[in-house]
Image (cartoon, helix red, strand yellow):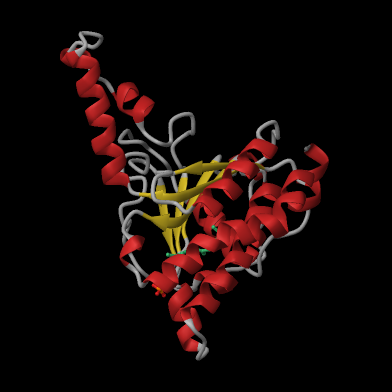
Amino acid sequence: MIERLKKWFAKPLSNTGEALDPDNIPTHVAIIMDGNGRWAKSRGLPRMAGHHSGMKTVKRITMAADRLGVKYLTLYAFSTENWKRPKAEVDFLMKLPQEFLSIELDDLMRNNVQVRMMGYKENLPDYTLEAVEEAIRKTANNTGLVLNFALNYGSRKEMIDAVRCIGNEVKQGRLDPDHIAERHMESFLLSTGLPDPDLLIRTSGELRISNFMLWQLAYSELWFTDVYWPEFQDEHFYEAIREYQRRARRYGGL
Ligand code: FPP
């Protein structure tokens, strides 16, 4: 690990010439990968070409995160609201995990990456779920970067479900309402077991959270870029982390 860091921090990691601090790499980076459609349109291509190109960015940024020593990378691949898109686009998006994993799983294994999923399994086509579950199974013992796909994920639903579970605990007499604490919510969220994101990145110039990890982002640093996801490069990722390293995180304190 030390050798790997030396290799990557010995030279400045961006065209600004300023090196990253290896002791202050965010543990968990979450990304809203936005702008696939606009990227395609700007090139006169169908939207699907944007999503396909975005899939290649997924691999590129996964590897960049791994090299930097990021421990968790959560990628918003499909929201509970994305079902409203035209069927052809939904079908295409649902095939991407399978295509991605058929190409990249061996390399993810070689790089000790552990694949996880955060989202609702219901409504996912069998081929999508099977591909993701196979990757989760095969990589379960890997100890490197955790690559967490937010797939059919929606934060309000996640929180309502958690509140429902807490209500049930109260009803069964296992939990006193006066003792309900953050840890109870967290134990029922889909992200249970993951630390909260330290840094949220959203590409494409939109300044919204879009129902993504609303509870978990309470104290995350937010970083936005106009760059569309298909053209998001390692250097943009380093720039986000550099900005993160400039910020003072106070968690409400002084
Ligand atoms: C938002 O951009 C993007 C999505 C809804 C899908 C994101 C999916 C990928 C980047 C590929 C995922 C790959 C794997 C391996 C799961 P948009 O289409 O809404 O762009 P627009 O706002 O410009 O129209």
Residue 51 visible at all: yes
Residue located 36% across and 44% down the image: 217
Position of residue 144 in the picture relative to residue 98 (left or right): right
Residue 198 x %, y %: 47, 43
Write the residue at 20% across / 22% down. 167
Q: Is residue 247 left or right of residue 105?
A: left
Left or right: where 187 falls relative to 49: left
Residue 18 vs residue 187, the one in the foreground: 187
- For this orientation, the residue located farthest to the front is 126
119 w.r.t. 140: above or below: below
The residue at the point 71 percent across, 56 percent down is 104
Q: Is residue 218 above or below residue 11?
A: above
Mark yes or no: residue 115 visible: no
| Number of numbered discs overlaid on the protein picture | 0
Residue furthest out toward the bottom: 44
- Spot the residue most to the top: 173
> In the displayed structure, would residue 180 be above or below residue 215?
above
Q: Is residue 88 shown left or right of residue 164?
A: right
Residue at x-position 60% and y-position 49%: 131
Where's the C terminus, which quadrant? Answer: top left
As displayed, is residue 26 above or below residue 168? Answer: below
Viewer-nearest residue: 168 or 29: 168
Q: Quadrant of residue 237?
A: bottom right
In which quadrant will I find the N terminus?
top right
**Residue 186 occupies which quadrant of the picture?**
top left
Residue 129 in the image: state x and y as whole percent: 52, 48
Residue 151 percent coordinates (x, y): 45, 51
Percent across and percent down for residue 204 are 43, 71
